Amino acid sequence: MSGARAKFSLCVVSFDFTPTESVDAGMLMYHLKCGLHTVTFQYLFHVFTAIMYWLKFFFFLYFCIYVVISVSSCLFEMKDKLRAMGHPAMDAADREDSHAGCFSDSVGMQTYSLNTSLGAMHIMSRLNNEMSFVEDTASGSFGVVKKGVLDLDRQCYAVKQTKRVISGEGDLQQRLQEVYTLSACSHPNVLRYFDGWVEDRAVFVRTEWLSDGSVADFDRPFSEALLRSVIHQIASALHWLLCHHITHRDVKPENILARKMEDGTYTFKLADFGLARPLFRDRPNTGEEFRGTNDDDGDRRYLSPEAFAISEFSQQKGEADVYALGASCVELMGGDPSLVRNGCYTGNFHIYSAELQNLVQWMTRLDPQERPDAFMVALLTVDPALKSTKGFARRMAAIEGLRASVAELEKKVTEANTTEKEEGGA
């Protein structure tokens, strides 16, 4: 091998040597070890470089996400502060959003969703910012009812606040059904709605305030005249809801509010539409679909027998609401409404006229198809004074007297305004 040149290669690393006289085995192993060490070092260097590159990339990505979240939070806080301060720009945006979440002409069909932010906590509560003398008046599993005076018009209003925290968009739409329904209702025996909003993961609904509370707080048993008035007015409200394809699903004395008038009579109004839903899920003429369903059944004491059945039942005439109104009447008579589905009419049921007893029994028939509709119930409980010619004439005379009084007051106001303008011009 003298004068010869040998070349050894290992993987990607090569090295040359020219032996003089003979090849030393120890020297050969030495060169092999040096080559292996060189390969290992270069491999580790490339791995380390790749790891550092990806670490820098992930740190940069994390920084970008952090900046976006921080800027978004600041924008939400600024928006809430401007809304709490009543900034005109926020008022305009709210007016644009007020068209969202409305029902169509059927009232029961929701076609849009409200533009609400569930994540942003309000810097200043709208309730405390716009109202004074706020106090709790009632509380239950559903939430809290507060009473307060609106600073703008100094009128007293009721504000219902849901107690359970909203858990997501689906839950939000379910809670907003009361807002959607009340905002489209216009009937003298339905609680008047003014506005609603979402704040700190709770729904607030502002309605009129009825100082006499619910009929559940009245002394029992009711007089027959007062009970007839309750049945007639609430049945009128249920008939209006039926005409707009809505079922209330929670008719009970606690949800029938009262206001005493100057002549000693009462106006009764149906409240709490948290469980309301449309009678038809799909509208055949428009193709709209109701999305915000509510699976709660309401108070079991007033539930109709078919509500306990496994299969779904038809509510084409609002039969369940009629049954609940009849069971509520039994309670106002001093009886137990939960026993009505067993055919037991307890309390002072026997002291009422046969006509009223038959009507309540008819309303609480086990077969929903055998019950009267709300219109028939309202028709059968019309004030007897209106049925007679003399009574009707007396009511019309009273109405004409009120109209004359209003005309006289308008005349005096016009004269006073004219006099004030003349004095100001002089």
Image (tube, grey):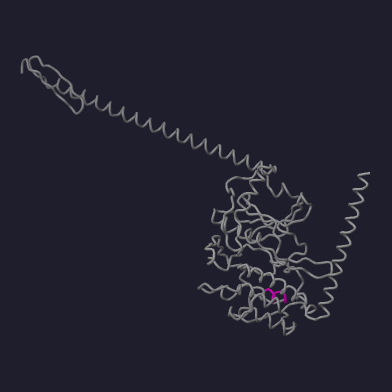
Q: Give the image quarter of residue 248.
A: bottom right
**Direction left: furthest residue:** 1
Q: Which of 90 and 260 is in front in this view?
A: 90
Q: Is residue 339 left or right of residue 6?
A: right
Residue 34 on image: x %, y %:
21, 23
Q: Could you tell me which quadrant the C terminus lies in? A: top right
25 up-or-down from 263: above or below: above
* First to last magenta residue range: 328-333
Residue 156 on image: x %, y %:
77, 56
Residue 323 on image: x %, y %:
63, 75
Q: Which of 198 and 279 is in front in this view?
A: 279
**Direction bottom: furthest residue:** 354
Question: Does the magenta run of residues contain 329?
Answer: yes
Q: In this view, does 15 lie to the left or right of 68?
A: left
Q: Could you tell me which quadrant the N terminus lies in? A: top left
Q: Give the image quarter of residue 220.
A: bottom right
Q: Nearer the viewer, residue 120 or 244?
A: 244
Question: Does the magenta run of residues contain 71?
Answer: no
205 up-or-down from 129: above or below: below
Residue 85 on image: x %, y %:
70, 42
How would you classify the magenta stretch by its main secondary structure? helix
Q: Is residue 21 left or right of residue 207?
A: left
Please give the count of numbered marks on the rendered protein: 0
Q: Give the image quarter of residue 27.
A: top left
